[in-house]
Image: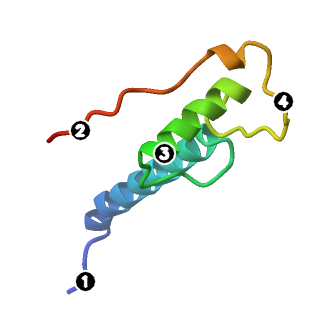
Amino acid sequence: MGVPFEALLPYGIIIGFMGVTGAGLTAVKYWSNEGKTARWNRDLWDRQMMERDLRLTGTMRGQSSNEVAPKGFELSNPWKVEKRIY
């Protein structure tokens, strides 16, 4: 005895919606990272460099090859106090 056609419809719907969700998540990650692969396992150094890039170029993923910082950049000091547990 075969499987009725009506029993396969819910599985098709579930697989279809999971595919749409996965494609949507991939598209959002792609656009939010300006067409580059998503960053993972970011440590403190990476986060500070992302903040610096944001201050220099206006985007988290943008990088600048200018050897001279823009006007006003010399006054924005990003240093933070490091908290350690002793």
Going by the numbered disc 1, the residue's amino acid type is Gly
Going by the numbered disc 4, the residue's amino acid type is Val
Marks 4/3: CA distance?
22 Å
Chain-order first, disc 3 or disc 1: 1
The residue at the point 14 percent across, 42 percent down is 86
Q: Is residue 10 above or below residue 8?
A: above
**How many residues crowd around disc 3 within 10 Å: few (fewer than 14), some, or many (20 or more)?**
few
What percent of the width, then of the height, locates residue 26?
53, 51
In the picture of the structure, the residue carrying the numbered disc 3 is 45
Residue 32 in which image quadrant: top right
Residue 56 in which image quadrant: top right
- In the image, which is nearer the foreground, mark 3 or mark 2? 2
Marks 1/2: CA distance?
66 Å
The residue at the point 85 percent across, 35 percent down is 66
**How many residues crowd around disc 1 within 10 Å: few (fewer than 14), some, or many (20 or more)?**
few
Chain-order first, disc 3 or disc 2: 3
What percent of the width, then of the height, locates residue 13?
37, 55
* Whether residue 58 can be seen here: no
In the picture of the structure, the residue carrying the numbered disc 4 is 68
Dot 2 and dot 4 residues touching (CB under 8 Å):
no
Disc 1, SS: loop
Marks 1/4: CA distance?
73 Å
Residue sitting nearer the eye, 29 or 9: 29
The residue at the point 56 percent across, 21 percent down is 77
> How does the figure colour the protein chain or chains?
rainbow
Question: Residue 84 bears which disc, if any?
Answer: 2
Q: Is residue 3 above or below residue 28?
A: below
In the image, 26: left or right of 41?
A: right
In the picture of the structure, the residue carrying the numbered disc 1 is 2
